[in-house]
Amino acid sequence: MKKTIYFLFTKSVGLYINVLSFLLPEKATQLAYTLFSEPRDGKLSKDNLPAILQETEKETYHHNETHFQTYTWKGNDTIILLAHGWESNASRWENILPYLRKSGSTIIAIDAPAHGLSGGTEFNIPQYAAFIDVLVQKFNPQYLIGHSLGAKTCLYYQSNYPNNSIEKTVILGSPSDFKIILNNYIEMLSLNSIILGGIEAHYLKHFQLKLENFSGKVFAANIQTKGFIAHDKDDTIVLFEEGKKIASTWKDSVFIETSGLGHSMHSDELYTKISQFLFE
């Protein structure tokens, strides 16, 4: 019953946007983009933070008329920066933290745009990468770990922001081709070609990005640092082939195939391998 209601709701929204596109195409495109880029989950409350985040040093940074939140587990001079994915927040790293903290490192987790305690209503990778760059410039982390769209943001960052501090990057469950994500959204709402073209034009105008080049595979080809790429064969959110695409162009990387973990990729065995990659 819930699936039927959701199906009818999404198709009704799509029909409204399609009709609007013939009357007010710019307004219709903006509505479609807003629905596409605004997360519906992942926000946090300062008064009710998950326990794992309550024990951290918290700091808010301001950048380009918005703000973003970080959480730090203090350690030694080795810095690890963590970037979560879509409709999540910094608490998603709770399971891997014991493995990372064994090294004595300082660990910094960031809330993505419009997630956790960070500001804004829109998530986009270029803005997320700009947030990461603020922290890289300040803390010079040696290691970067990302999950899902946070992982793709790490790829985008490494490809577009030159830096000398990051030595190794861990990519978990990352999508590669942005067009697949967008086409899935277009298909879900049955949106017409006017909207598809309008969204593509929006990315070109605001982010100087052609969607065929907005690809993890393309980004990875430009990365010189060591990479650890892991993807689960049973991932129903981001297909396994997406991880293989990224690995195919990243020269100095290892690809780990997991099974039964789904998109979350929580596993003691995987976390042990990540620790070995980073610290041994």
Image: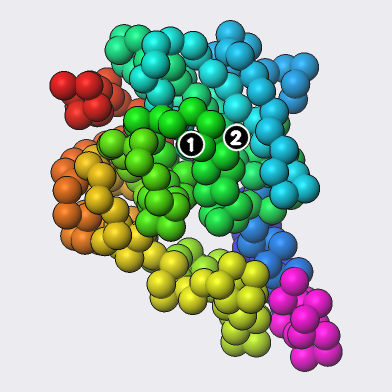
Residue 136 numbered tag = 1
Q: Where residue 220 appears, x then y in whole percent?
A: 30, 57
Instruction: Residue type at mark 2: give it.
Output: Asp
Vertical arrangement, residue 158 with respect to residue 192, above or below: above
Instruction: Residue type at mark 1: give it.
Output: Val
Does 65 sit left or right of 233 as displayed?
right
Q: Is residue 17 magenta?
A: yes
Determine the image quadrant of residue 151: top left
Judging depth in this view, the residue of 50 and 203 nearest the camera is 203
Judging depth in this view, the residue of 264 and 132 nearest the camera is 132
**Mark 1 near mark 2, Cβ–Cβ under 8 Å?**
no
Q: Which residues are magenta?
A: 16-30
Please say whether residue 241 is visible from this viewpoint: no
Does 110 sit left or right of 176 as displayed?
right
Question: Which of pointers 1 and 2 lies earlier in the amino acid sequence?
Answer: 2
Residue 111 numbered tag = 2
Q: Which of pointers 1 and 2 indicates the residue nearer the eye?
A: 1
Q: Quadrant of the C terminus?
A: top left
Give the residue at x 69% y 28%: 60
Determine the image quadrant of residue 172: top left
Please say whether residue 103 is visible from this viewpoint: yes
Residue 59 numbered tag = none
Give the residue at x 64% y 76%: 205
Q: Where residue 93 appears, x then y in whole percent?
A: 46, 25
Q: Where residue 98 appears, x then y in whole percent?
A: 37, 12
Q: Is residue 259 magenta?
A: no
Give the residue at x 19% y 60%: 248
Judging depth in this view, the residue of 186 and 73 nearest the camera is 73
Vertical arrangement, residue 44 with respect to residue 27, above or below: above
Does 196 sit left or right of 213 as displayed?
right
Residue sitting farthest toward the right: 23
Does 96 sit left or right of 5 as displayed?
left
